[in-house]
Image (cartoon, rainbow, N blue to C red):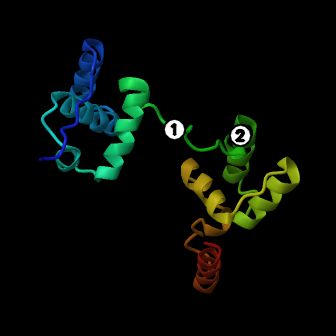
Amino acid sequence: MGRRRTQLDLSPAERREALRLVRSGADPREVERAGFALLGATGQFTMEELADQVGRRRSTLQTWLKKFQAGGLAGLLARDAAPGVTSPLGAARVQRQLQAGLKAGRWTSAAHVAAWLKETHGITRSRKSIYYWFEKFGLRPAATMSLPAETPLAKRALVARKARSHR
């Protein structure tokens, strides 16, 4: 006796929605899951064969099947948890102050920015997190900015070494 074929029961509305998602190609996650639902609705494949068709492990498809059985296509597409937590550095007021200070050259390192954030806003962040915001603004702390050509070579080398050690 062969393995049992997997049969998903899609309503006509769910079938239309799954086809729309697969054709739109907008969200790869939704395309993949809608494709699974459409293949599963044919009733021609075992779970192993579906896994091969979709390019996922059987255990992943079993999880998807449980979600589908619990909530239909909407349940299959639903996200389990909200995307990441919003950073307090993302607040508009903090952003404006940080950007203005960076443009003015107020801070010479990520450590200085971290101290300012802690003192002014009560926000604790790692250097890595602060460098993320520098990059997002297209700016760098003053110590890592290019020095004028007339600056002695030794001083430019020293500033470059300090900047590298702070990364």
Give the class, few, some or many, for how many residues have Cα within 10 Å of label 1's Cα (few <14, many ≥20): few
Q: Position of residue 20 (x, y in %)?
A: 25, 21
Farthest residue in the bottom direction?
154
Mark closest to the chain's N terminus, 1 or 2? 1
Between residues 142 and 31, which one lies in front from this camera angle? 31
In the rendered image of this protein, does residue 166 appear above or below residue 124?
A: below
Instruction: Give the structural element (helix, strand or loop) at label 1.
Output: loop
Question: Which quadrant of the view contains residue 39?
Answer: top left
Q: Which mark is residue 45?
A: none
Q: Who's the residue at 31% across and 36% down the image?
A: 33
Q: Which mark is residue 96?
A: 2
In the rendered image of this protein, does residue 93 appear above or below residue 122?
A: above
Indicate the amino acid at tag 1: Asp
Q: Position of residue 117 (x, y in %)?
A: 79, 53
Mark 1–mark 2 Cα distance, whole angstroms, equals 34 Å
Q: Which mark is residue 80?
A: 1
Pick the quarter of the image with the C terminus.
bottom right
Between residues 21 and 59, which one lies in front from this camera angle? 59
Do the numbered discs 1 and 2 sit on residues whose CB atoms are within 8 Å? no
